[in-house]
Amino acid sequence: MSSKSITGEGGAGRAGDKIFSGITVTAGCLILFVLFCVAVFLMWQALPTFMADPADISGGGGFGRYILPLVIGTVIAALIALLIATPVGIGVALFISHYAPRRLAQGLGYLVDLLAAIPSVVYGAWGMTVLAPALVGPYNWLAENAGWIPIFAGPASQTGKTMLTAGIVLSVMVLPIITSLTREIFLQTPKLHEEAALAMGATRWEMIRMAVFPFARPGVISAVMLGLGRALGETMAVALVLSSGGLIASLIRPGNQTIAAEIALNFPEAFGLRLSELIAAGLVLFLITLAVNVVARWIISRHKEFSGAN
Amino acid sequence: MVKVSNFGRTASVLTVSAAVALGLAACGTDSAAPVPAGTGAESSVTGTLSGAGASSQDAAMQAWIAGFGAANPQASVQYSPDGSGAGREALLAGGVQFAGSDAYLDEEETAAAVEVCGPDGAIHVPAYISPIAVAFNLPGVTDLNLDAATIAAIFRGEVTAWNDPAITGQNEAVELPDTAITAVHRGDESGTTKNFTEYLAEAASEKWTDKASGEWPAGLPNGESASGTGGVISTVASTEGGITYADASAAGSLGKVSVLVGDTYVPFSADAAALAVESSTAVTGEGRPEADMAMDLDRDTAESGAYPVVLVSYHVFCTSYGDQQTVDLVRAFGNYVVSDEGQAAASDAAGSAALSESLRSRAQAALETIRVRS
């Protein structure tokens, strides 16, 4: 009887194996196929832009001249967001994983995750109506006292709708991604490593520095990269918050624009070549995101020896 | 966003071709009898009318679709707000039966229209007139007098304080503070921007050297921008010293500028806007039918009481369609839109200005020329 049930189960297991591997292979191929389709669509629709006379492109200087300020704007916004969100996110994650009492940690974890569920248009509306006006005073102060630094050159915007504001809103939006991923990774640090460090007489901070951070580094990097992906592609919030314009070094004056917001703002009325231009801009964003991910993978693979897998 | 919209376009084109095919199949050859035109009489029209085009008239269009559908339960109208250019393109490709457009067909498009719409080409009927208010936020000030050159200078960032002599000189009765001016323009491409810059380029040609365009000139670094009518209005409402241009219906409690026309300052009103449209010059040329109402607005008008900062959005129809059913449907819808009832519905929904009596009768006459293709 026992042998029968074993073979019976074995048979079912083999069938299950086949079905399951079939499903996973299909899912894996499907995502590649979708990605391929998106890439083909973007290239096909963007083609007229690259064939067109450079004088016909918006701005009259060819696609390169058109897209470069947008690329720079996109990168600046994402960098501001990461500069703010990474330390804060790691701090919150450490607090939840290693400092806070268990009860508080759980509640706080839920709250941070909740931040990720708020639609971006709500962040945008908040940034536009609450945050931007509130930042006018600080921006004026920065322009007066730190105006010699190019990024704080005045006169400051009187609406507060600037690149810095957009970056701050973006940082709030990427915070939950960075926090929840890094929290999970910090929690996976082998208890033995932590206890060994403490037993050697390390303080809690030294233990975190010696045991937690090296173990978590690749995970933190992927968390930051995921956050970067969100910041690069964020559309509505930037479109609402940023007072877009030409490329400008100062972060507290109106100006600059990101690719995603440029597409969102101009798509509804675009047709013909303009539509193709916007899709070409989308293609550039796609390539940037791809490059970011490749770099992230590469960094993680260099730090493989720390990963939890071995 | 990209995918959804494309799907919508494909879907509407499919629906149209299906409707056209059905119509062709159902109708014989001997149905070319003219149908009496009227505004509310045709409850007998059937079928589906498809249009695409300007998003500026989308709010009004929703009201028209609802009103027309209620009066003609057998008929329905679809409208896809893909933008003026996309709408004209779809009309000329035969994908839709009418286009909504903020600009009339250019010469190339007029030539293309002859091939799609028959020998008389396409016909424009003004459907949606919306005055654009120049609105500002200065506590205690509800009305300012400005000429086009000063408005241009403000939006170019050349006049930067509210107590600049260029402004105070025209407003001696008003106490103006030294608040900095924050000029806010549309960050997205829009017909409002196109008409506003067209006004500045014509009425203040020595100050405003950029070409009129739906996108704000990239070379002006001083302005703030916001997306959509709601965006510019809320930005100005929360910024003391802010000024912007927007559909008059959205300007709410902000102060409004009276613009200098001839030698009087005219505040915006529906009547003043309709007057400006009426005093515009008709566009004539090869391929444009006689009854066509395409017009060049005279932004530099000296007509007293006209308010030249105005957006006119057309409905572009073919002058001939393949079957009587479609002709009836097009005429019934066109007539409903320009009727008192239709214009009132648009004005409730979108705050537009109603067509004047003479524009309406011309529009009805223009719709009357739509025939079955022989």
Image (cartoon, grey):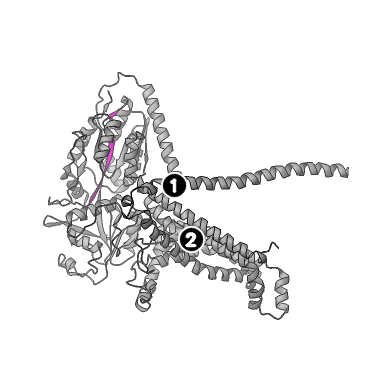
* A267 on left or right of B282: right
Quarter location, residue B159: bottom left
**B6 lies above or below B256:** above
Against B241, residue B333 (above or below) is above
Badge 1 element: helix
Where residue B226 appears, as percent x and y from the top left, is 35, 59
> Any magenta on residue B311?
yes
Q: CA distance from mark 2 to mark 1?
A: 20 Å
The residue stretch that appears in magenta:
B304-321
Residue B337 visible, this orientation: no
Name the residue: 19% across, 62% down: B150
Q: Is residue B18 visible?
A: yes
Q: Which residue is mark 1?
A: B2
Kind of residue at disc 1: Val
- Vertical placement of A173 versus A38: above or below? below
Q: Amino acid at mark 2?
A: Ala
**Pointer 2: what residue?**
A231
Among all residues in the image, which is located at the extreme bottom? A201
Instruction: Give the x, y percent position of residue B358.
Output: 17, 39
Q: Main secondary structure of the magenta part?
A: strand
Q: Are marks 2 and 1 in contact (CB under 8 Å)?
A: no
Is A114 magenta? The answer is no
Secondary element at tag 2: helix
Q: Is residue B70 left or right of residue A211?
A: left
Of the 4 image quadrants, the one containing the N terminus of chain A is: top right
Q: Quadrant of the C terminus of chain A?
A: bottom right
Q: Residue at x 29, y 60 (%)?
A: B219
For mark 2, name the chain. Answer: A
Q: Nearer the viewer, residue A169 or B357?
A: A169
Tell me which chain the residue with mark 1 is part of. B
Residue lying farthest to the right in this orientation: A1
